Image: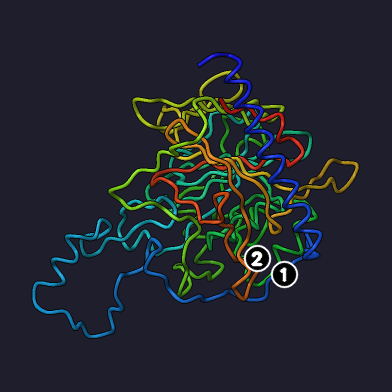
Amino acid sequence: MSENNNEEKKSINKKAIAIIVLCVVILAAVVGVVVFANRGTSPAEPAPSASQPGTPDKDPAKPSEDKPGEEDAAAEDDPNALPKGQMRSFLSGLPVDEKIGNRRPVAIMLNNLKAAQPMSGVSYADVVYEYVVEGAITRLMGVFENYDGLDKIGSVRSCREYFVYTALEFDAIYCHFGQASYAVELLDKDYVDNINGLGPAGDVTYYRTTDRQAPHNVYTSEKGIDAGIDMLGYRRDHYEGYKGKFKFCDLDKEVTNEGGYPATHIEPKYKINKPWFDYNEKTGKYERFQYDGPQIDDLTGEQLAYDNVIIQYNFWVQLDDKDYLAFDCHSGGAIQYCTKGKVVPGTWKRELNEDNYDMSAIRYYDLDGNELEINNGKTFVCVVQNDEADNVVIK
């Protein structure tokens, strides 16, 4: 493809994102959305949907009216049929034991400063979020479904309010070591289950190592997390009717983003760690780089890699002269969904049809308004300030 064609496609792609962002601004103004208000009251319990991962195709309490052999035939025709005791993960869409899939994940704040590299255990998170915090540095939040056997996860850092809103989408138990003052009111809500390193369960949940200086040496583990949950008396399984966040494709399908633009190299353009993703055609995954080299998990020695990379554009404000930020996690915005070396544009919005707005999930949609299907596997979401859209590189 010629250089002129590449530049033309890049220009078209950026214009599309700019138009989407403009439309969302107008929509937010019309509906009068209150961007940073605390909206929730209590956990919602929507009716189960058979189309979502983790939910059965039939009500187990309802007697079957199928004739002998019909149920087995139907199971053979169902691409998502699984052996007894298994279900599709809410985080990855892949088959997991019901014990793992039904329990609440933990969302752990991860230190992303250079002095804290390499991280430990981050590759075990099925979903990872990256946001900018003060000083243009970024912080990660790993959402872990199966942390069994892990004795070192971290290093763990402090809370920012917008990460809590994201953790609530997954019905996750939020793990952090301290917090910004702006997050205290939200953390005190009765529907926010969090394990604070400076709170009553801090000593049993977290520990410090001697190989790094504070604040880069705080870690947690399976035993620590379980001890913290027990001490605080938190619910261990998802609430009844939990639907999950993502819409995954069938297990026998693959999303190829046919008709999308090339996306073999992605730069979210964060200013300090300067991360990027390169698509590995052999593995079908996006490999993660930052600080001028591969991002490695210290526990495995392997580079982080993801099946899906989502660039999510959020409106934001600076809260004070110390550069603390707030991100609008409710009103909606533009996205770019990258998988299998291609990117398509779309939008995001938080559901409005549940009793608790904060615990409602953000859903992703194509430009025709259809909910976006994503590939099964691991997902990395880069949340980018909406006015930085023109600086993001996808090619």
Q: Secondary structure at mark 1?
A: loop
Q: What x and y, as percent, mark residue 83?
A: 20, 60
Q: Is residue 125 visible?
A: yes
Q: What x and y, as percent, mark residue 266?
A: 56, 28
Point 48% across, 72% down: residue: 239
Q: How would you rate the neighbour count of disc 2 (Cα within 10 Å): few for under 14, some for 14-19, many for 20 or more?
A: many
Point 13% across, 66% down: residue: 73
Q: Is residue 285 above or below residue 325?
A: above
Distance between the alpha carbons at the discs numbered 1 and 2: 6 Å
Which of disc 2 and disc 1 is earlier in sequence?
A: 1
Q: Secondary structure at mark 2?
A: loop
Q: Quadrant of residue 185?
A: bottom right
Where residue 271 is drawn, which disc sits there? none
Q: What amino acid type should be assigned to the residue bearing mark 2?
A: Asp
Q: What amino acid type should be assigned to the residue bearing mark 1?
A: Arg
Residue found farthest to the top:
2
Q: How would you rate the neighbour count of disc 1 (Cα within 10 Å): few for under 14, some for 14-19, many for 20 or more?
A: some
Q: Quadrant of the C terminus?
A: top right
Which residue is the site of mark 1?
39
Q: Is residue 109 above or below residue 339?
A: below
Q: Are marks 1 and 2 in contact (CB under 8 Å)?
A: yes
Q: Is residue 298 visible?
A: no
Q: In terms of depth relative to the viewer, which is nearer, 331 or 118?
A: 331
